[in-house]
Image (tube, coloured by chain):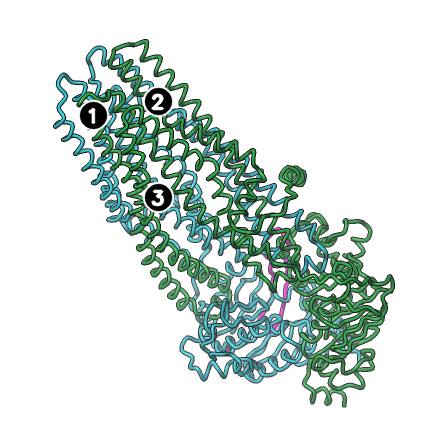
Chain colours: A cyan, B green
Amino acid sequence: MSTRLPVADAAQIRAALRQDVRSDRRAFAGMLVLNALAALAALVGPAYLGRIVDEVTGAHPSVSVVNHDALIIVVFALAQILVSRWALLIGARFGERTSARIRERMLERALSLPASVVEHTTTGDLVSRGTNDAGMVAATLRDAAPIIFVSAVQVLCIAGAVLVLNPLLGICGVACLVGDVFVLRWYLRRSRPAFLAQSIAGAAITDVMESTASGARTVDALGLEQRRIEAAETAFAASIKAQMHSLRLRLVLFPTVDASYVLPLAAILLIGGALYEHGEVSLGAVVASTLYMRQLAGPLDTVLVWIQTLQNAAVSYARVEGLSAAPQAPVPTGAIPAGDRIEVAGAHFAYNADHGDVLHGVDLVVQPGERLAIVGASGAGKSTLGRLLAGIDHPNQGTVTVDGIPIADLPPERLRRQVVLVTQEHHVFHDTLRGNLKLAKADATDDELLAALGAVDAGWIDALPDGLDTFVAGNGHRLDGAQAQQLALARVVLADPHTVILDEATALLDPATARNTEQALAAVLRGRTVIAIAHRLQTAHDADRVAVMDAGLVTELGTHEELVASEGTYAALWRSWHRD
Amino acid sequence: MADHDAARIADRYADPRPGDLRSPLRFLLWLIAGQKWRVLRASVVGSAWMVGLALPPYLLSEAIDEGLRSRDNGALVGWVLALVAFCVGNAALGGLRHGTMTKIRTYSAYQTGLSTVRHATRLGAALGRKSSSGEVVAIGLGDVQAISTALTVTGPGVGSVVAYVVVAVLLFTISPLLAVVVSAGVPVLALTIGPVLHRTHGAMTPYREQNRALTNRLIDIVTGLRVLSGLGGKQAYLGRYREDSRALVRQGYRVGAATSWTGALGTGLPTLFLAAVTWIAARMAAEGSITVGQLIAVYGYVAMLVAPVSSLIEGAQQLTAATVAARRVIRFLALEPDHSDGEHDLGPDSGVLHDPLSGTEIPPGSFVALVGAESADCTGVLERLARFTASDATWGAVRLDEVALPQIRSRILLAENDATIFAGTIREAVAGRRAALEPDLGHAVTAAVASDIVDALPDGLGSTLDSQARNLSGGQRQRLRLARALYAQPEVLLLVEPASAVDAPTEAAMATRLREARRGLTTVVTTSSPLVLDRADLVLHLVAGRVAASGTHQELWRSNPAYRSVVSRTTATQGQEAAQ
């Protein structure tokens, strides 16, 4: 039933990345320049220390020259603080703006997904892209990216400085670190799956803790204490195993890279020693080169520590950007129905090609203003037919039309006025009651809102502390399942479509409330076409006609009396339900 | 396999000592005491490694003084080899330290997490009243991490203090003046960074809150996507998200203003300090009171001090966070389960179950249905009979609140409609605390009309369920819950609306088979479905929380209009019309 949303490929990621940098290119250029300036300022220290060394080892060391050079070191250290602060500030702001752009773009795309995609996507997938993935990208842009950027620029500047100071020593020094690139590649190829395994294990722990706590009452009732502790032990053991695996990878990377930093030092000292002996370099140049190579270790380590985060962020970015590759809503043909006669002709439907048809050629005509009930066992295809009638899905074969126009081809705005589907799955937004209702009719007056609530027998509105302004979710006045269902029905009253499809829309209500709500709703919807999918036969009894579904086909169709008289499935069911 | 690992790790980490809940600090000490050898190793290795960082500057200075400057190739090669050997050795030590620290963290996370899960199971039904699953999740997601991370103090933290002292001593051998300047200057430096960090923290708190609110809004919109796509209101919600997103950007700028100072000062102040110390040392070198090699060594020592100082600052922050986290953990662990363990024993044959508040009497071995217009009335009776709330309920001659709770739980099972189904295989879910034995398991599944669920899944009983069995439909979950309750074979089974989410034919089959499976055992169901009521030995009709009428379904249907209206879901007057 559910399909996964796509993930962006490498080309799409690059394009999106270019776009994000381009939309804020001045800040990006500023970051580049300021970071380079800060890194250059940091190079002055070792260079002037080298000059001091030359001065001190010279024939007549002069304290005033030393003072002058040392003052320059201090001044540049101060300059480095100010410039890098500025660079970090620009970087942080760039990160914030870019994260906002990414998350807003992601929501826009989610909201423009066609109903058929929304219906078949697991909410969890979208939620985790919007929260975990977008959050990961934002955190990386905020915390990691500026630091990595600074460090990368520093590494380049230091390497450049060593090369300028003495090309031969510089080349030897830098060449000694080439091996690290291979170790890093070895590591990154393995660290990604290891990291994934670790986060899956972490999520499993959260899940065990959450379900044990939220299900503590069930644990108590069924005596599952030991089972839950075992489940927790298993989850923690899996997590420890995953962590030990990542640890083993890090135990190869960190010590190797750590140890490798000494190689350029050794090379510069030995080669520098030989050159100095022949008078080809000054002692100061050799000292400065070794100090630069030592200085290289800091930013290189930083890049190394954060590169994993960067890799993970790239995967998250691909998932967030993947929404752009989701199927788009079909372009509406522009045909607008004039009448409300619904016709289903030879409709076949399969959720996916491997699983066979759920509907095997349904034929059905619903007259305008008719009240039709659809009954049948679970799996008979009732809800599937409901979704076709609501224009959410296209039939694979055959047609579902209103006034001769395929329902699923209507543009969203028009479809909403034509037909609305209400299911058991309701959602109360973290908003006031007014906000929750107004989404169905943006310009509704308070009187209209109250009338709609009255129409579904929602008397509880009088008990709300702030009436329509009451916050009805989260920390506010939480609505229970039955009230939420009535809210969903009140929205339909406000939307006032030509056709309403109720798929078990009152199943959560108390028997008495359900009855009152259905009757109140019927009064409001008089003249509208109402298609009710129900397992309570009382609903069928009240309808103009009843369609009985079995194994993807409409097997019986007629009024309640006709079907009872015909002695078919419906008649048998009715008698077992109502033995009087 | 994972279970084998779980047993092995549980065995290795098993800690019989109860957690020390007297204060957050004592709780942290308890975690340390449970792994004292590992912590000792971390301290020793951490100190050795950190002190080891001070040696390369010394070796480097010797290589320059003895080898390079004296043009002594033998000495140069010797010192360089010593430098390389030492750095490689210290890198290995660094790996060992990292490994030990990781293990300390996993052990601490394991102990804290499992203590929480164990306590959650001990609290049982009381957890919902005294705490919340959100609290437990907060512990699992944040506090466990904060606590285990803070224990890093035992390795690098101790190491930093030792390294600091060692460097001070080394500097003293070069120049007492430098030793005083450095050892006094570094704490001043750390204290300077303190207020900046505090400011960052201050800006971070509102940012995190705003970010959480924005994330919640996204989850809200995405989970309500079906509603928005069916009824409209997308633009309004997108607009509000954008507004919040922009507000977060402004908060982020505030954070950026603070963190950019932290970042710049964090690396800049040590550099500035380094410049100042270098100045003093360079003057001394120019005056001839120290050698060039010593000048380089001073530079190296001071540069090296950055590591222990920043690790101490970090450690202080982590400890603060861990204290807050540990306080929350011990507050949860200190919650008392509400067992008022009575001294009475239930007899082997316990007689009539009686709830005086409602006037309900359940004869032993009977199949009784409770029906009422307010479903809360009926569930209230079952909660009292199962002693999930305080009551005067009796079983035979014994008051239930005078019997030890485990005795009641093992004989009376309250199976609620929304009971949690934990992640795992179907076999595990149905077996509950008992071992999964055929053919009983198959019988329970058949009796709950759940065979088709098992058959449709690829691995039958071995198929895995998501947490809360989210991969099943509402009706399928309900049948699994019933199978689980039946497999437990309690003497008394109290079922809340066991078939409210299934279609009529399935409901009929469930009622018939339930009665069959419970033959000779006491069973009470709350329901308003005639299909179930018709199969009960005795139906009790509750009005305003009291038993108003009792008899068989047929008797009550014929003689009692109020009953009829509840069951047929019609209002009282229409019920009379139907009867006439």
Is residue B15 inside the magenta stretch? Answer: no
- Residue A568 seen anywhere in this rendered image of the structure: no
Q: Which residue is mark 1?
A: B284
Query: Residue B57: image x %, image y %?
Result: 32, 24
Query: Residue A253: image x %, image y %?
Result: 45, 30
Residue B461 to residue B37: above or below:
below
For residue A395, side relative to residue B504 (left or right): left
Using the numbered discs, state the Cα–Cα distance from disc 3 to disc 2 in whole angstroms. Answer: 27 Å
Using the numbered discs, state the Cα–Cα distance from disc 3 to disc 1 in whole angstroms. Answer: 42 Å
Compare residues B152 and A8 and report the one nearer the observer: B152
Extent of the magenta region:
A339-366
Q: Which residue is mark 3?
A: A145
Residue A546 to residue B168: above or below:
below
Using the numbered discs, state the Cα–Cα distance from disc 2 to disc 1 in whole angstroms. Answer: 35 Å
Compare residues B192 and B200 and report the one nearer the observer: B192
Task: Indicate the quadrant containing the C terminus of chain B: top left, top right, bottom left or bottom right.
Answer: bottom right
Query: Residue A154: image x %, image y %?
Result: 28, 35
At a point 30% along the width and 31% down the height, the residue shown is: B302
Residue A77 to residue A12: above or below:
above
Report helix, strand or loop for mark 1.
helix
Chain at tag 2: A
